[in-house]
Image (tube, helix red, strand yellow):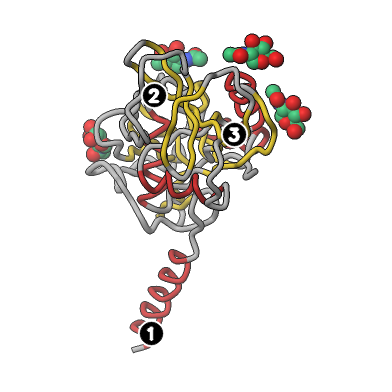
Amino acid sequence: MKKMAQILYFSLLVIALCSLSEGIQRRYHYINMNMNWTEAQRYCRENYTDLATVKNINDMNELKKTVNNKPMYVWIGLKRTDVYKWKWSLGDPVKYMNWETEPSTDTNNCAVMRNGTWHQQKCIDKLGFICYNDELILIQENLSWTEAVRYCRENHVDLVSVDSEKIQLMVTEVLHQASTAEVWLGLRHSCSVGIWFWVNGEIVCYDHWAPGNETDVDDCEREVRSGAVQSGGDHKWISHPESKQLNFICRRKKK
Ligand SMILES: *[C@@H]1O[C@H](CO)[C@@H](O)[C@H](O)[C@H]1NC(C)=O
Ligand SMILES: *[C@@H]1O[C@H](CO)[C@@H](O)[C@H](O)[C@H]1NC(C)=O
Ligand SMILES: *[C@@H]1O[C@H](CO)[C@@H](O)[C@H](O)[C@H]1NC(C)=O
Ligand SMILES: *[C@@H]1O[C@H](CO)[C@@H](O)[C@H](O)[C@H]1NC(C)=O
């Protein structure tokens, strides 16, 4: 009976810990300074991640909120690269589109947003703009898990803790630039306690393990195991000895 109560208590504790996890989001920032498109891009790249990229209707709604739903024209990170081709500032193809009118082939080669729809605009015009900040950054250096933690803590906040499906999705967005087949996460195994935990102190609630890897800890006495995510495929989590040299993902400071 006592044991039963203990198990129940532990389960409740786990639920409580799991529900405390704090989300990571793409953040948009309205910059109330008039600049041409190129200057605005430089400003965003230096102080944030880039000019705003819009992937779906949710992003669009967030974007509208950053200007308090005011009907003003602001630069977004969309530019014409060819007569019929538009691209996001970081080179991503345009999948979600919301033009007020079909873009014409004139020389208005940059895009502004107003009221949630997009319009063509001359790139030399000076307007306010919206930057975005990804809270995750892929570091293309090959380091051991412990070195990766140190790097993230010195330069950013910490190695990323993937405590929800939402964060797993954000992780997959930065993975395409990885140069190693797997990339370190802030996932660590405790050999003595026999559990996996995140560097932010949380135990693992949401998980995305590749089959067999969660329990593949046989030689953990010899070397601590840590968790990485596959750069390709289904982006499953893999267990590796911590000395393996991999790219890694840091969580950035909030702005
Ligand atoms: C970044 O922000 C600072 C402070 O607002 C500003 O002085 C600086 O010029 C910005 N960087 C660029 C490239 O505009
Ligand atoms: C934007 O402004 C900068 C600095 O004033 C200038 O050098 C550049 O040519 C302008 N770019 C465009 C596309 O107008
Ligand atoms: C990291 O390792 C990968 C795969 O072995 C290699 O292709 C890449 O060039 C390495 N990167 C650095 C910065 O050494
Ligand atoms: C971990 O997952 C990978 C990819 O699915 C697989 O090749 C490997 O055998 C797994 N490790 C163990 C110990 O099952």
> On screen, 48 above or below 14?
above
Tell me the mark number nearer the camera, choosing from 2 and 1: 2
At x 64%, y 25%, the residue is: 126
> On screen, 93 above or below 251?
above
Query: Whole-percent x and y of residue 43?
Result: 65, 26
At x 41%, y 14%, the residue is: 106
Q: Is residue 208 left or right of residue 112?
A: left
**Other-residue count near label 2 (Cα within 10 Å), few / some / many at <14 / 14–19 / ≥20:** few
At x 59%, y 39%, the residue is: 252
> On screen, 76 above or below 12?
above
Tell me the mark number nearer the camera, choosing from 2 and 3: 3
Residue 92, which numbered label?
Answer: 2
Q: Which residue appears farthest toward the bottom when viewing the image?
A: 1
Query: Whole-percent x and y of residue 230?
Result: 33, 32
Q: Mark 3 points at which residue?
A: 129
For residue 62, say whether it is visible. Answer: yes
Q: Name the residue under label 1.
A: 5
Q: Quadrant of residue 187?
A: top left
**Other-residue count near label 3 (Cα within 10 Å), few / some / many at <14 / 14–19 / ≥20:** many
The tag earlier along the polypeptide, 3 or 1, is: 1
Q: In this view, does 66 lie to the left or right of 211?
A: right
Amino acid carrying mark 1 in the image: Ala
**Other-residue count near label 1 (Cα within 10 Å), few / some / many at <14 / 14–19 / ≥20:** few
Q: Which residue appears farthest toward the top when viewing the image?
A: 82
